[in-house]
Amino acid sequence: MTYINKYLQDKFGFNEDLEDKIDEESKRKYTLEKLIPPLKFNNLPIVLRRFAKAFQENKLSQGDISYLRQNLIEFADKHKEIPELASARLYEYEALLLDSQGMHQDAKTSISQAEALLTGKRKLVTDWGEAIYLHESRVAKPYHQKNLNNTPNARKKPIYKRKLFYAALVILLIVAWQPVANWYAVVSATPTQKAMADSLHLTSKGRVIFFETKPQLMDTNAFADVCPSDANEAVEGCYDPNTNRIYVRVMPDELKSAETVTSAHEMLHAAYQKYDTSTLKIINSMVEDQYSSMNDPELTSRVTDYNQSEPGAQDAELYAILGSEFGNLNPDLESEYSKYFTDRQTEISAASETKNTFDAYTSQLDSQGKVIDSENSLADKYYGASISWANAGNAYEDDYYYNLYLNEYNQASRDIDSYNQLVDKYNLLIDEFSGKVYTPLSQPQKSNQ
């Protein structure tokens, strides 16, 4: 998740203390749900990835896995009509659960059913699922490699020469591979991907990292499939470290600046993933020093939300947020970001532009509201004067003030209509920003993907 301004936090955010609401009987369920969210049609990829991660980190007991299998069975029983893609995700989840309990053959059967339901370019979500499926394929179609030791020429070649040759070949591949991979990532980029990179003002290193992720601009519906989110979140983009892919949700014309901020944010996630542990310690220290020196309530609120939705990801998120939205950072941090951006002011200006777009609406609404209040106050004043003169029997003054009242009343009515139209436009913009309303790709974007 990238930029969410104060108004959207107020609209979609939540700050409840969940720990205080959990009784003893629900502790196990709550603990599991913090690791793996409950099954929903719009979050199945997240469930799969979270389960695979939790199992890999030895955070699940066999009792937990049995509990999750029971939940899967109940979910499937509850929903008799399940779309094909959701069925494929559920079969993959079942395969992981079975495999984690040692039922490998049953896991193969489930993963085969998942694969059979995937159409077009859709793939299994997890590497684990791919491994189960590929293992089955290898059993069915074994690859037979020729045994060179049975050929006369191979027997005559001295063993040390073969070792030397292969060692030299490996070294050559190691030395040459990365430049070749970098070159291919750049030359294979689509027109849309190049336009996205150009808008970010990236260095050569930044462009390579960005193009390696094959960034994809997606309409609202397609984005929801690859980057599912909680109903309380407004997610504009995501980076999948498992596949090294970036996905960005297309924005309405008024909020194109948000696409720039999102793309930069997710690119920094990809860059952050490349660092080794010792380097990350240094970077995390710089990020935390910068954060502790800032007094930004909105940023603090966002970090709090991240800590609830993605525990342990604070430094990674701060690294992406600070680099894509904030200027005048500590010199060491500015030097870090200069590896990837030639002009980071582009991202900072885009972040301000997105916020200013919403601020302009609220400012205009506040201003119009004050005008309407003033008009209503004058209308009430003139109406009261008209009544007083009518009671005094002065028809001339009564008519004079009544006409003033009508003028103010009619003007206030026109301004109220204009105010309500602006409210509707503002609410639509918020819904488009949050993904609640469908925003399509333009025709040029579709053809240039």
Image (tube, grey):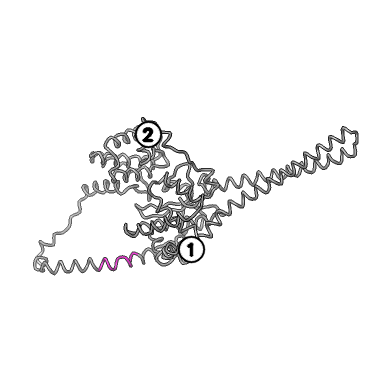
Given residues 71 and 190, the one toward you in this image is 71
Q: Quadrant of residue 399?
A: top right
Q: Quadrant of the C terminus?
A: bottom left
Secondary structure mostly taken by the magenta-highlighted segment of the chain: helix
x 60%, y 47%: residue: 426
Which portion, as a residue range, is magenta? 172-181
x 33%, y 64%: residue: 181
Above-or-below relation of 253 to 115: below
Left or right of 14 in this view: 405: right
Given residues 404 and 219, the one toward you in this image is 404
Above-or-below relation of 38 to 274: above
Q: Which residue in the rendered view is the most extreme toward the top?
A: 25
**Marks 1, 2: nearer the viewer:** 1
Q: Tell me, yes or no, if residue 27 can be seen here.
A: yes
Considering only order in the chain, which callout, 2 or 1, is on the residue closer to the N terminus? 2
Given residues 245 and 156, the one toward you in this image is 245
Tell me which amino acid carries mark 2. Answer: Phe
Left or right of 392 in this view: 194: left
x 51%, y 59%: residue: 348
Tell me which amino acid carries mark 1. Answer: Arg
Q: Quadrant of residue 377?
A: top right
> Where residue 287 appears, x then y in whole percent?
42, 57
Specify whether residue 177 is painted magenta. yes
| Residue at image mark 1 | 344
How far apart are the alpha carbons under marks 1 and 2?
47 Å
Q: Secondary structure at mark 2?
A: helix
Residue 75's label in the rendered image is 2
> Where residue 294 appears, x then y in whole percent?
49, 55
> Where residue 167 appears, x then y in whole percent?
19, 67
Residue 333's label in the rendered image is none
Specify whether residue 291 is painted magenta. no
